[in-house]
Image (cartoon, rainbow, N blue to C red):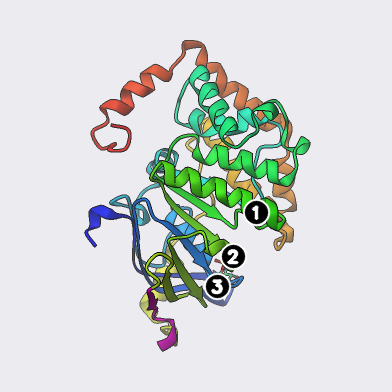
Amino acid sequence: MSKAFNAIEIDNLRKVYVIGAERVVALDRIDLEIRRGEICCLLGPSGSGKSTLLNMIAGLEKPTRGKIDVLGESISSMGETRLAKFRQRRMGFVFQAYNLLPSLTAIENVSLPLMFRGVGRRRRRRAALEMLDMVGLRSHAKHKPTQMSGGQQQRIGIARAFVSDAPIILADEPTGNLDSKTAAEVMSLIIERARMHGQTLLIVTHDSRIAEYADRVVHIFDGRVAKIENNISGEVEQGAWSDDAREPFDAAEQSTLESWPEQGALESDGAHASELEDDIFDAHDANDAHDATDATDATDANDATDATDAYDAYDATDANDAYDANDAYDANDATDTYDA
Ligand code: ADP
């Protein structure tokens, strides 16, 4: 398959976490290509490395070894500022725990990605309302997340992921907190929207029922690709996992690990927008029931004053209505094939 058709290319990827004296090989020798417009599912049991892979595709973590290209750009070697911009323009995110900012209304939450991109208030509002229509929640535009059910919150999360028409949508266990009927509704929404707009959709799940929605299912087991099922052609491709035995550590890798700073969630650009963006990713951690130390993050994420202040402060720049200027920038950005 020609590179031009690939949205994501992963080459010999390896990720090792170091916790004190212990090393965890979360992913090893992953080679994978995901085509533009493809709906692909990463399926595997808990702890198999799915989220780690998704985080690295999003540029939230750096590989220990190997390379990831997203839309022809090397995401694994980009600096933080460029990465943040790349994500804003190219990626939409759906999280298991929705990650809506609790102090903002539904319409404000949905319009956040457009705010990060400098789109002005009126146009943001129009686009957000359109998305609320799409998910059937226009009547809830002024509701805060706590005034909505889980299914409704995830619909808002979906509206937020799709509002900026990003070419790639990454969804991490999008139905993990929903009952099966709501899960099916939410999946139909995501799939329909992605297909209609030709977006590449990558879904992480441990639920084989969710995998049925995908064009291809990449089975991850023990940090490796076990097999790839093509739901359209019925073909099954065996992965490398079966010949297993993870590579041993060597001295060179040890020194790489020591020199590589661990990446956290999005690092700040120093602007209000990135503070809010951090909050979205932090909220994800905060809702991670496995990690007790995240209790403080939960408090931060729920700090209504902070989020509203940041939103309002950023919004204030709209007095000069900057959005048209930003649109002109998009249209003239030669590297920006999607906006052109
Ligand atoms: P999954 O998404 O399939 O449940 P993960 O990608 O979350 O799996 O985890 C894969 C492996 O990497 C697990 O053994 C997990 O404990 C480990 N791991 C994930 N994130 C970290 C981290 N930040 N620090 C140390 N180990 C981690």
**Residue depth check, mark 1 versus mark 3: number of the one nearer the observer:** 1
Asked if the stretch drawn in magenta spans residue 246, the answer is no
Classify mark 2: helix, strand or loop. Answer: helix
Classify mark 3: helix, strand or loop. Answer: loop
**Residue 177 in view:** no
**Residue depth check, mark 3 versus mark 2: number of the one nearer the observer:** 2
For label 3, the residue is 48
Residue name at image x 54 percent, y 75 percent: 24
Mark 1 or mark 3, earlier in chain? 3
330 to the left or right of 291:
left
Kind of residue indicated by mark 2: Arg
For label 2, the residue is 209
- The vertical placement of 24 against 302, above or below, is below
Highlighted magenta segment, given as a residue range: 235-243
The residue carrying pointer 2 sits among few (fewer than 14), some (14 to 19) or many (20 or more) residues within 10 Å by Cα, namely: few
Kind of residue indicated by mark 1: Ala
Identify the image quadrant of residue 325: top left
Identify the image quadrant of residue 140: top right
For label 1, the residue is 183
Q: Residue furthest right?
A: 147
Mark 2 or mark 1, earlier in chain? 1
Q: Quadrant of the N terminus?
A: bottom left
80 to the left or right of 301:
left
Q: CA distance from mark 3 to mark 2?
A: 18 Å
- The vertical placement of 297 against 243, above or below, is above
Q: Give percent across and percent down for residue 5.
A: 27, 54
Mark 3 or mark 2, earlier in chain? 3
